[in-house]
Amino acid sequence: MEDPTRQVGVHELNLASRKAEDAALRRHQAAYWLDCVVGPLGISSRPSEREFISCLRNGLILCNLINKIQPGSVPKVVDSNLPSQSLQWDSQPLPAYQYFENIRNFLVAVEELKLPVFEASVFERENLEKGSSKVADCILALKAFHEWKQMTGGYGTYKPPRSPLITHSAGRIHARTSGMVTFNSSRQLDMSAALDKPLSTDGEIQKFEDVIFKALAEHMVDSKENMDSNILAFFHSGNVDSVKLLTTIFSSCLEEQFQRKLPECWRAGMNGKCNHRNLVRQQERELLNLKMLLSSTKKEFGSLQTYFQCDLKQIGDQVQEMSTAALGYHKAVEENRNLYNMVQDLKGNIRVYCRIRPIFNAGAKNVIDHIGDDGSLVVVEHLKPQKDKRKIFQFNHVFGPIATQCDVFRETRPLVRSVMDGYNVCIFAYGQTGSGKTYTMCGPAGGLANELGINYLAVNDLFQLSDERKDIVEYRIQVQMVEIYNEQVRDLLAEDLSDTKYPLYFEYLYSTLYCL
Ligand SMILES: Nc1ncnc2c1ncn2[C@@H]1O[C@H](COP(=O)(O)OP(=O)(O)OP(=O)(O)O)[C@@H](O)[C@H]1O
């Protein structure tokens, strides 16, 4: 079985070695930085504790350092007036008051900056190898303060990092003017006290490592807080290094925008509250709802489509029926028209009507013996022998003396209507003077409406027929009026009354009519 005391000894050895390595590293860093800031120290780049402390024990370098970082911190630096080359650690014939004065003023200045300090006694010859780590920590704290000042210009409140490796001693230094100056920063961790006694168990070692990690984490948080407060202090001070401030602000803004651009689930995930899976489930539910909505919409659209298709089919059928009916109607009209004109043809293209004028002379003898419905007319000539007295004439129709204008027009009307179907029609009156031609064709002068002649009645009928068929046929009606008298044809509507002679082709027409 292994001896536990032996194991503890190994741990102690390892910790002591690590502590010594860490102290040497910080000492070397402090020496290097001092060399850069206040000039060559004249010591090696990796000085021993003794070499490091001896170099600083006259306080001259430390006072120059803090005056450079915070001008005026040590108004009066006691100088040995010796060349710098003679400031060797092992050849400094300085009186005790000199280095004590400088060291004391330096420590007071450091305490005013609220930075960790050390005991002045570390520079006594018998303690040269005991307090070098605290001196190095103090110098490194000044280095951090200097860097903060360079970055912020000294505006705002400087918060020293909570380093477990930086130590301080409270209330050990006398102030120059106001007596005791106390440094009570509770944010500092004095780890050296914990390491003064050896760690004997694994639990203590683990506990010590936990403390270190916790302190490091707090240090990182403090650094972040320093940055934020320093940016605000920059802005309020008005004395701002604009380039530095803008760079810092832009960096913060970019980081913030980057955070905002991240999806919600990622940001929640970065905060330790990842609901990415919940969001995916919610989106899946919404997607399912959308699919159901799409499906129902498709169904409704399909039913509406079917409904409208039925309606369209019904309308189409009705239109087809109407079209068929209209076609049938037109066919019927056309057929009726053809039949009508056929009847007119069968009745004869040339029809002769006889109208008997009333007797105006009371003494005149009536020669009309009989008027037949078949168009026959029997005339009696009283002066001739009995056997030759009666003569029979045949017409299409015979109008008696009591026949009205309407009776005459009723018989001629079908022929007039054939004009509207494209047939040529001619109506004229023939008879001796005073037989009533003008009366039949035009009516008496100044007569009543029921006395209008065939011309007026026929034209009125044509206009009425044109109006009835206006949706089917467009008619254009023109009028000419001529007189044939003493073998002369004259235009009765001519505007130039001096020349009413009608064109030659009407003379030809006249000849034709005359022949008829
Ligand atoms: N059916 C009738 N009923 C009543 N009066 C008639 C009828 N026919 C003709 N008359 C009258 O007889 C007269 C002569 O008729 P009208 O002038 O029409 O004859 P006409 O044939 O035109 O003569 P002309 O050849 O000389 O012009 C007129 O006064 C007219 O009013």
Image (cartoon, rainbow, N blue to C red):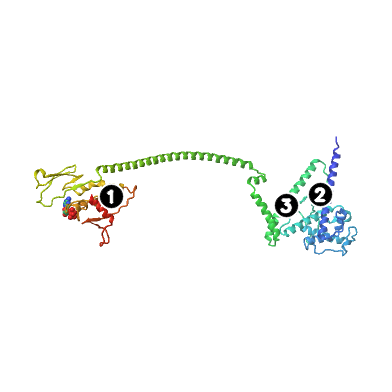
Q: Secondary structure at mark 2?
A: helix
Q: Which residue is mark 2?
A: 192
Q: Which one is closest to the eye, mark 1 or mark 2? A: 1
The amino acid type, in three-letter code, at marker 1 is: Leu
Residue at 78% in and 43% down: 207
The spot of residue 38 in percent (x, y) is 82, 60
Residue furthest to the top: 1
Count residues near mark 2 (Cα–Cα under 10 Å), then give few for <14, some for 14-19, many for 20+.
some
Residue 131 placement, left or right of 418: right
Q: Is mark 2 within 8 Å of ligand 1?
A: no
Q: CA distance from mark 1 to mark 3?
A: 113 Å
In front: label 2 or label 3: 3
Q: Quadrant of residue 146?
A: bottom right
Q: Secondary structure beneath disc 3?
A: helix
Say which residue label 3 marks: 222
The answer, for residue 105, to whether it is visible in the render is no
